[in-house]
Image: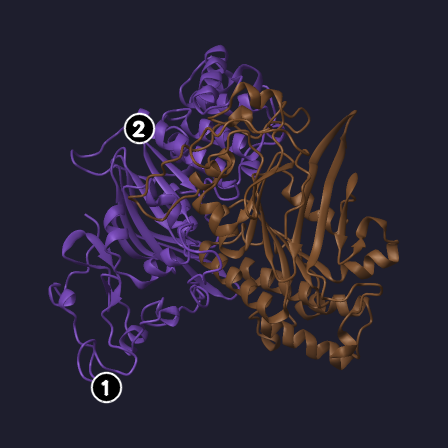
Chain colours: A brown, B purple
């Protein structure tokens, strides 16, 4: 099997605890003559073996962040450091090598698989590209991996993606992503196109594979209930910025940002007696072409004050491992009073 | 007279009228079957479904992909193509038998009396037509409005579904709107002619949870205002839990449980319904907790298993379940129907435990399935159908 594993030249030993450090990440897109900032200075880090959830509405920049992590979408500024290597500074060849260790799973499992190829070829492709192992070794690894994701290799290997359901296609995508023995798996809305029953299967599978292969994960989704289930820590994103970062259970118990509170309130509970005490969010995400002044959430925030329009709240610590970017966080009552400005939302998440 | 009206002049006119008997539900579906002829065989997508919807009420239809819920909603509407489709059973809507109408007559009903909100607003809207035009189309056809009146109504409709500055937005194209806004436009189109019943097929799947809450709240508000009935088709029990009056759970083309929403959640009888509920991640659970996934997949509808269709995935399945199909029946309250030989009682199965013993009784050689206390109260002929 050793022939099939990828060794990354120049990578630091695995004793380094932080797998990924993202610092002041900015991603801009040209839109006609204007520039849209999809990601506006996001900083966080992911520890080895951890699952970091990244949650927010459509258009908040969470998928762009995920794509910028693997440099599919080159960042405009800021850095993505993977095990001591600044991915933005690597040569094309080195970057390709580094990317074998960072794999992605996408939202639409059916369109992310080539409809004209057989399942076993799709899954074998990472090994074929890197010419790892002998033909027999590659075939054996494909079988093992398909079995690991719950696909019967004999029955499924020669079939094509269209013959499978969405959940099965997502399993095949996961098998393909794991073929290159990645350390870091970036899952971009992997279950939002699936039924709740299939969603549960895939989430359980991801948890099993994470334990089996010792993976670190970044899990991107809009559903906080799903994100909370899989993540150790959750980062909440709004209009290109992080507004709150906290351990999952703490985020649920004591959400400090009004936006997090609204996200929690919008999740449908399978209980007819359940009445959310929080009001659902009104309005839509403002255009990132012209973001609101000060706090970007103030236009939809039920607690917004004058200060919120004037000054942008920095991301600051309110408890160990719990950061929030709000002038009036919901901890200990809705009004805690303004705080002194600090660095503007650029503090990397503490270890 | 508008060109639209002129083109229809001289045709025999069909006027839809409410012909329901007093006390008759708005929609009565009786023993509906829909099958598709395919190269591999006949797919029984809807296999004997009966249900009713009262005026102004909301019925939730819940099931996984492939359970037949979408085919059911299209069969009720009469939207399936005639080719290679075999249907039987009746659909009565406001006293009229939809299943006996031809396409021309159905066109008078669609949009005006019975309308549909589709899952994907981008593909359901016409990409090259301004959204205003897409709303006024049905107003002019069904309500015979002139252009000016229809335009003004379109603006009002957009306003009522919460679209800001509707005077400008009527001139926009679908691509200029976000997913949530497009779904609001779909709702505006569906409600334009004040239908009696709206069929919403996964109206919020693919939307953000925040937008989902907004859209469902909006639909509920408009429903109360207009006293419409709504059928909400979804795979997510969480979506219908606080919005539907009654819920039908479908599996493999059949209804496996039907009850008023409160009863369904408080007194779940069918293990499949319970499994669907358990598979939803709950916010209150600690993170990292293992979800209760339902093993396996829904059965092949060309060669469905004998007996209970859920038996191959059911943790409590017995020999009896694999051999004979349980009828839809009641126990206790007459409006709670379920199709299970060993229904749950307070969340616990009444099936004998795996070693062959019945609950509470000493282990013994294979005992014939002992009827539970809940079962004994059942009339053996109680294969109940909706009134």
Which residue occupies 73% across, 41% down?
A25
**Left or right of B17 in this view: B39:** right
Q: Are marks 2 and 1 in contact (CB under 8 Å)?
A: no
Quarter of the rendering occupied by the N terminus of chain A: bottom right
Does the image show residue B46? no
Could you say whether the residue bearing mark 1 is in a helix, strand or loop?
loop
Which residue occupies 28% across, 52% down?
B265
Could you say whether the residue bearing mark 2 is in a helix, strand or loop?
helix
| Residues flagged by tags 2 and 1 on a common chain | yes
Mark 2–mark 1 distance (CA, rounded to whole Å): 55 Å
Q: Which mark is residue B366?
A: 1
Of B257 and A192, nearer the camera is A192
Chain name for mark 2 = B
Disc 2 crowd rating (10 Å Cα; few below 14, some 14-19, many 20+) is: few
Q: Position of residue A325 (x, y in %)?
A: 58, 35
Residue sitting at the far bottom: B365
**Left or right of B160 in this view: A44:** right
| Quadrant in which residue B139 is drawn | top left
Q: Which mark is residue B224?
A: 2
């Amino acid at each position: 099997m050793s022939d099939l594993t990828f060794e990354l030249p120049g990578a630091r030993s695995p004793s380094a605890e932080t797998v990924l450090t993202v610092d002041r990440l900015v991603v801009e897109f040209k839109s006609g003559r204007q520039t849209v900032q999809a990601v506006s200075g996001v900083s966080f880090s992911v520890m080895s073996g951890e699952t970091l959830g990244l949650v927010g509405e459509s258009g908040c920049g969470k998928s762009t962040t995920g794509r910028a992590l693997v440099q599919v979408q080159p960042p405009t500024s800021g850095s993505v450091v993977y095990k001591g290597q600044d991915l933005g500074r690597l040569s094309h060849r080195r970057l390709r090598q580094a990317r074998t260790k960072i794999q992605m799973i996408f939202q639409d499992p059916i369109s992310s698989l080539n409809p004209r190829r057989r399942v076993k070829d799709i899954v074998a492709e990472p090994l074929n590209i890197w010419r790892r192992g002998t033909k027999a070794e590659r075939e054996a690894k494909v079988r093992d991996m398909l079995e690991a994701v719950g696909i019967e290799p004999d029955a499924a290997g020669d079939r094509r993606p269209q013959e499978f359901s969405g959940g099965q296609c997502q399993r095949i995508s996961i098998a393909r992503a794991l073929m290159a023995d990645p350390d870091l798996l970036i899952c971009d809305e992997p279950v939002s196109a699936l039924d709740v029953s299939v969603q549960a299967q895939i989430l359980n599978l991801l948890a099993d594979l994470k334990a089996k292969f010792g993976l670190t994960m970044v899990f991107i989704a809009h559903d906080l209930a799903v994100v909370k289930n899989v993540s150790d820590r959750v980062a909440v994103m709004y209009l290109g910025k992080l507004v709150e970062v906290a351990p999952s259970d703490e985020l649920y118990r004591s959400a400090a940002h009004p936006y997090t509170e609204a996200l929690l309130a919008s999740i449908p509970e399978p209980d007819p007696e359940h009445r959310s005490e929080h009001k659902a969010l009104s309005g839509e995400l403002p255009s990132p072409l012209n973001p609101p002044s000060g706090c970007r959430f103030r236009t939809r925030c039920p607690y917004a004050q004058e200060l919120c329009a004037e000054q942008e709240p920095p991301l600051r610590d309110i408890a160990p491992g719990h950061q929030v970017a709000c002038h009036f966080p919901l901890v200990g009552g809705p009004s805690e009073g303004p705080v002194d400005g600090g660095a503007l939302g650029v503090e990397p998440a503490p270890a | 007279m508008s060109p639209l009206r002129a083109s229809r002049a001289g045709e025999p006119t069909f006027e839809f009228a409410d012909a329901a008997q007093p006390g008759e539900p708005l929609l009565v579906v009786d023993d509906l079957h829909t099958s598709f002829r395919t190269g591999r065989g006949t797919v029984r997508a809807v296999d004997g479904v009966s249900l009713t919807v009262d005026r102004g009420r909301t019925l939730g239809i819940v099931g996984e992909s492939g359970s037949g819920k979408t085919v059911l909603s299209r069969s009720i509407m009469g939207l399936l193509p005639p080719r290679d489709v075999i249907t039987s059973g009746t659909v009565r809507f406001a006293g009229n038998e939809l299943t006996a109408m031809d396409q021309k007559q159905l066109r008078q009903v669609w949009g005006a009396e019975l309308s549909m909100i589709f899952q994907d607003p981008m593909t359901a809207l016409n990409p090259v037509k301004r959204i205003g035009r897409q709303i006024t189309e049905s107003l002019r056809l069904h309500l015979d409005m002139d252009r000016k009146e229809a335009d003004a109504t379109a603006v009002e409709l957009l306003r009522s579904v919460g679209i800001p500055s509707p005077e400008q937005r009527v001139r926009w194209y679908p691509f200029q709107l976000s997913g949530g806004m497009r779904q609001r436009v779909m709702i505006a189109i569906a409600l334009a002619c004040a239908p009696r019943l709206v069929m919403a097929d996964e109206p919020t799947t693919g939307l953000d949870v925040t937008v989902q809450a907004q859209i469902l709240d909006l639909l509920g508000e408009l429903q109360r205002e207009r006293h419409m009935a709504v059928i909400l088709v979804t795979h997510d029990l969480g979506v219908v839990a606080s919005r539907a009056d009654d819920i039908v759970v479908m599996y493999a083309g059949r209804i496996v449980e039907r009850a008023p929403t409160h009863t369904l959640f408080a007194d779940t009888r069918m293990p499949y319904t319970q499994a669907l509920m358990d598979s939803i991640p709950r916010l209150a659970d600690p993170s990292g907790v293992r979800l209760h996934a339902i093993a396996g997949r829904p059965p092949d509808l060309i060669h469905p298993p004998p007996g209970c269709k859920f038996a191959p995935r059911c943790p409590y399945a017995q020999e009896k379940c694999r051999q004979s199909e349980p009828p839809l029946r009641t126990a206790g309250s007459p409006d709670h129907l379920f199709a299970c030989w060993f229904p749950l009682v307070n969340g616990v199965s009444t099936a004998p435990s795996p070693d062959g013993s019945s609950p509470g009784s000493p282990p013994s050689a294979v005992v014939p399935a002992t009827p539970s206390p809940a079962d004994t109260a059942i009339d053996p002929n109680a294969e109940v159908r909706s009134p």
